[in-house]
């Protein structure tokens, strides 16, 4: 048996006796396994309660044991987020952090951070969804942490909230298929 280089789909070698039913069944099994393993939502998490308040950075939702395959294009995504602050002069935000050496914490490497002025405690900002690309040259197991934070200065606290407009905090990782590499043109 031979296998394809990208997806390890089995096919009969040219010198092998062809057993049509068996080879079709093997191929179907390989395709099912590949699609289940590599495409679509790999892991997801949901929070339907508010976080505690913080004057620094506080973990809100974490995804562990995310299998990342070398050479594939992944998206790390959140639902729209609702951050509440208690002081109008504060700048509050959210952060995505990741670790490949265990459980992600607020000390793990930062993938991105989004901050906005609180504006008013009566009208806290709604943050748009976060969507980040993630590509690895090696197979790895990833842990991703979504945290809420009060910016570098301020006097109030920050929390991530759920309500009727923002009924949950969602975090998920999708595999979008093989990475084509950077084919863009920098202008």
Image: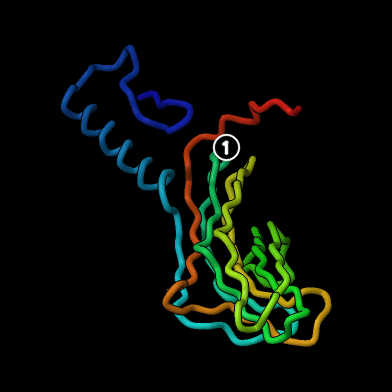
Q: Quadrant of the C terminus?
A: top right
- The structure residue drawn at horizontal position 75% and vertical position 73%, both measured from the top left corner, is 91
Residue 68 in picture, x, y percent from top left? 54, 49
Of residues 43 and 118, the one nearer the viewer is: 118
The answer to which image quadrant residue 143 occupies is bottom right
Give the side of residue 151 with respect to residue 85, left or right: right
Q: How many numbered marks appear? A: 1
Label 1 sits on residue: 71
Q: In x, y percent, where is residue 129?
A: 55, 59
Residue furthest toward the left? 21
Residue at 79% across / 87% down in the picture? 155
| Left/right of residue 20 with respect to residue 112 in the rendered view | left
Between residue 123 and residue 81, name the one nearer to us. 123
| Residue 24 sits in quarter | top left
As helix, strand or loop, the secondary structure at mark 1 comes to: loop
Q: Position of residue 179 (x, y in %)?
A: 56, 34
* Quadrant in the picture for the N terminus: top left
Q: Residue at x 54, y 39 (%)?
A: 72
The colour scheme used here is rainbow
Quadrant location of residue 89?
bottom right
Residue 170 is left or right of residue 1, and the answer is right
Does residue 186 lie above or below 32 as drawn?
A: above
Tell me if 12 is positioned left or right of 62 in this view. left
Which residue reaches farthest top? 15
| Crowd rating for badge 1 (residues with CA inside 10 Å; few <14, some 14–19, many 20+) | some
Establish if 135 lies above or below 107: above
Identify the residue shown where x is 57% and y is 53%: 131
Q: Taking 128 as reference, is 147 above or below it?
A: below
Residue 88: x percent and y percent? 73, 81
């Amino acid at each position: 048996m031979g296998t394809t280089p990208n997806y390890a789909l089995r096919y009969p070698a040219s010198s092998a006796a062809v057993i049509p039913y068996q080879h079709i069944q093997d191929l179907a099994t390989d395709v099912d396994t590949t699609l289940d393993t590599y495409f679509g939502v790999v892991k997801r998490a949901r929070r339907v309660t508010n976080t505690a308040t913080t004057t620094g950075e506080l973990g809100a939702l974490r995804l562990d044991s995310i299998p990342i395959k070398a050479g594939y294009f992944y998206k790390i995504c959140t639902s729209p987020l609702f951050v509440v602050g208690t002081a109008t002069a504060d700048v509050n935000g959210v952060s995505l952090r990741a670790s490949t050496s265990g459980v992600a914490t607020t000390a793990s490497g930062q993938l991105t951070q989004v901050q906005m002025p609180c504006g008013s405690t009566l009208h806290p900002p709604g943050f748009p969804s976060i969507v980040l690309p993630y590509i690895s040259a090696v197979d790895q197991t990833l842990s991703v942490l979504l945290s809420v934070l009060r910016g570098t200065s301020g006097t109030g606290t920050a929390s991530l909230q759920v309500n009727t407009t923002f009924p949950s905090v969602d975090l998920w990782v999708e595999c979008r298929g093989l990475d084509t590499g950077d084919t863009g043109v920098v202008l």
